[in-house]
Amino acid sequence: MGFPSPASDYIERRIDLNDVLMPHRNNMILIETPDGFVLADKSLKPAPGDKIAFQIGEFPQLGKLFSTGIITSDGETIDGEGMEGIIVLGKMTAEAVSVHEPSRPII
């Protein structure tokens, strides 16, 4: 017997990264990049200034949406007639970047 623990009033549920990073799991796209990966949500409507995932041809790319076009991650601008073949895949919600460098020794 004894007294109940006073800490039992402060019990919180565990943090699940799937809940944090993917609130709309059925609408998420995982895009691999040279530096890591990006999660994009198809259900969110991107607004000017948002980072987006888009597709030109067969390959997905990343960029920043503006009212007149897109600036790619390479710094190129796509606007005007260039926007005709673009498919917006979704708004970027998370980005994971790898900091592992194989040339550095492990200490």
Image (tube, rainbow, N blue to C red):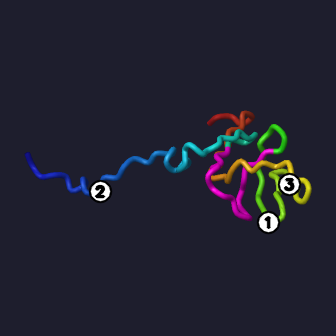
Closest to the observer: 102 or 13?
A: 13
Q: Which is more N-terminal, label 1 or label 2?
A: 2
| Count of marks, rendered view | 3
Mark 3 highlights which residue?
Answer: 83
Numbered disc 2: secondary structure: helix
Please, is residue 13 above or below residue 67 in the view?
above
Numbered disc 3: secondary structure: helix
Q: CA distance from mark 3 to mark 1?
A: 12 Å
Residue at 79% from the left image edge and 63% from the top image edge? 66
Residue 76, given in percent of the width and then of the height, sits at 88, 54
Image side of residue 10 versus residue 31, left or right: left
Q: Which dot, 2 or 3, sits closer to the camera?
A: 3
Closest to the observer: 31 or 26?
A: 26
Q: CA distance from mark 2 to mark 3?
A: 52 Å
Q: Quadrant of residue 83?
A: bottom right
Closest to the observer: 82 or 37?
A: 82
Residue 12, given in percent of the width and then of the height, sits at 34, 52
Numbered disc 1: secondary structure: loop
Name the residue at the right extreme. 81
Q: Is the Cβ of the residue at disc 2 closer than 8 Å to that at disc 3?
A: no
Mark 1 highlights which residue?
Answer: 67
Residue 101, given in percent of the width and then of the height, sits at 71, 38
Mark 2 highlights which residue?
Answer: 10
Q: Quadrant of residue 9?
A: bottom left
Q: CA distance from mark 2 to mark 1?
A: 47 Å
Q: Is the Cβ of the residue at disc 2 closer than 8 Å to that at disc 1?
A: no
Q: Amino acid at mark 2?
A: Tyr
Q: Which residues are magenta?
A: 38-55
